[in-house]
Amino acid sequence: MVERLNHCVYYVKYHMVLCVKYRKKMFLTDEVVKYLVELCHGLEQRYFLFFDSIGCDKNHCHVLVRAKPSYAPSDVMRIIKSVTAIKLFEQFPWIKNELWGGEFWSDGGYIGTVGEGVNADIIRRYIEKQGKKMDKNQMRLIDFK
């Protein structure tokens, strides 16, 4: 969907992968995953981010997010990581015992641009299947170079 601002029309969408620090398995309970999804949707109005899909698998999270063009991709990732980390530590204090040093997310991550159409549909389906057991015949994201 094309977005509009005062002086421009744009369509900017990213596929991002955020990894938990030390690859700790923090997304084992539905409660943590649901809270992360709520936090991301809470960022939408404040930062003009629009989350298309969010999926977590044990130690990492995939998001398909649209952003306004004034944000660099690294800014979008920084906003998501910083706000969600603070709120997750507040909501689930036991996480601090698992992750020493006070950081929830790893420093790096993956950011890729996504066009609408078949490419976005493939990534969207992949994200939605995060955390579910893979069928041996299921194609992996890496198969779509």
Image (cartoon, helix red, strand yellow):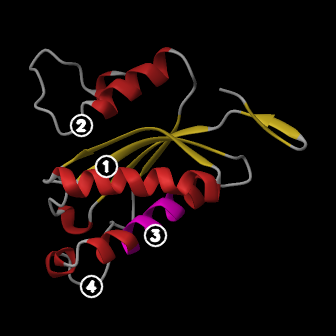
What residue is disc 3 on? 82
Which is more N-terminal, label 2 or label 4? 4
What residue is disc 1 on? 61
Which is more N-terminal, label 4 or label 1? 1
Determine crowd level at label 1: few under 14, some 14-19, many 20+ residues with C-alpha closer than 10 A. Answer: many
| Real-space Cα separation, disc 3 to disc 2, in angstroms | 22 Å
What residue is disc 4 on? 101
Q: Secondary structure at mark 4?
A: loop
Determine crowd level at label 3: few under 14, some 14-19, many 20+ residues with C-alpha closer than 10 A. Answer: few
Q: Report if residue 56 lies within the magenta region.
A: no
Residue type, mark 2 in image: Gln
User: At 62% across and 59% down in the image, what residue appears?
Assistant: 46
Name the image quarter holding residue 1: top right
What residue is disc 2 on? 130
Q: Report if residue 84 lies within the magenta region.
A: yes
Residue 37 position within the rendered picture, expressed as x and y whole percent measured from the top left: 37, 50
